[in-house]
Image (cartoon, rainbow, N blue to C red):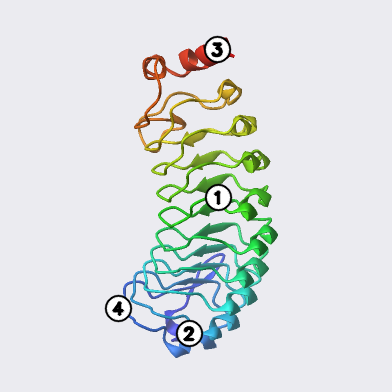
Amino acid sequence: PKSLLKRGLRYVSLSLIMKGMTSAPDFLWGLPEVQKLNLSRNQLVVIPPSLGKLDRLVVLNLGGNCLKCLPKEVGLLRNLKVLFVNMNRLTEVPAELSLCRKLEVLSLSHNCISQLPLSFTDLTSLRKLNLSNNRFLQIPLCIFALRSLDFLHLGSNRLENIAESVQYLVNLQIFIVENNNIRTLPRSLCFITSLELLNVDYNAIQTLPDNLYLLRRLPRIAWNPMDKGLHIAHNPLSRPLPEVVEGGLDALFNYLREKK
């Protein structure tokens, strides 16, 4: 097993990607020196409490497995900075995950999660959070306490609104809520002047807040998924907004400013 370890310039790594495993091999938990562990794209059904022994882990990738839950011992990974548990079968997240205070990147996309533990407010180092393709009816309140977030993806959920509290995410640069059931955008969203990409494609939005022009870092009306700017396609915008949008972002901002 030791021969599987790769000692890079920065990290001691172990990759067991696409090995067809239904459970993690026992030797794994006797390798406390591992800092990067990739167990993605297997058929893992459970991760044992022994995970907590790997307390030097900085990066852990469990994406693309069959996990229904994470062991609470994940909270013992106090050096963890990056965690991928996307494309599993999670219905909940253990509150103990909030003990990983160094966590900067967390992907829980493509699961069956509908709420997060309130203790998530303790993840003050979190910068990138992907909760897309889950079952959220509203943005969990704990998220609004994560002031370091610069990337938040909640696309393909069941959101019907965005709470005014979104304004507390003062460092947010990329905010994606495409493919939900959102009807209106709160005025407070326009106070996040750091926004460079706002994607509200495929929602039920009819009107836009008249102070949208405050989002000066949005460079354009964007049509390609990765482009910075305002993504607002496939919404039932009330007239004359569809025509105004055709004229570009400056035209839209001017229209909203005059309307105000």
| Residue highlighted by disc 3 | 259
- Separation of disc 2 and disc 3 at Cα? 63 Å
* Mark toward the start of the polypeptide (4 vs 2): 4
Callout 4 touching callout 2 (CB < 8 Å): no
Q: Amino acid at mark 3?
A: Lys
Vertical side of 154 occupied by 257: above or below: above
Q: Secondary structure at mark 3?
A: helix
| Residue highlighted by disc 2 | 28
**Comparing labels 2 and 3, the label whose residue is closer to the camera:** 3
Q: Would you say residue 102 is visible in this rendering? A: no
Residue 28 image position (x, y, % from top left): 48, 84
**Comparing labels 4 and 2, the label whose residue is closer to the camera:** 4
Callout 2 touching callout 1 (CB < 8 Å): no
Residue 216 image position (x, y, % from top left): 58, 23
Residue in the foreground of this view, choosing between 26 and 257: 257
| Residue highlighted by disc 4 | 20
Residue 47 image position (x, y, % from top left): 47, 80
- Separation of disc 4 and disc 1 at Cα? 35 Å
Which label number is shown at residue 139?
1
Q: Secondary structure at mark 4?
A: loop
* Mark toward the start of the polypeptide (4 vs 3): 4
Specify the quadrant that holds the N terminus.
Answer: bottom left
* Mark toward the start of the polypeptide (3 vs 1): 1
* Mark toward the start of the polypeptide (4 vs 1): 4
Q: Amino acid at mark 4?
A: Gly
Q: How many marks?
A: 4
Q: Amino acid at mark 1?
A: Ile
Q: Amino acid at mark 2?
A: Leu
Callout 4 touching callout 3 (CB < 8 Å): no
- Separation of disc 2 and disc 1 at Cα? 36 Å
Residue in the foreground of this view, choosing between 6 and 143: 143
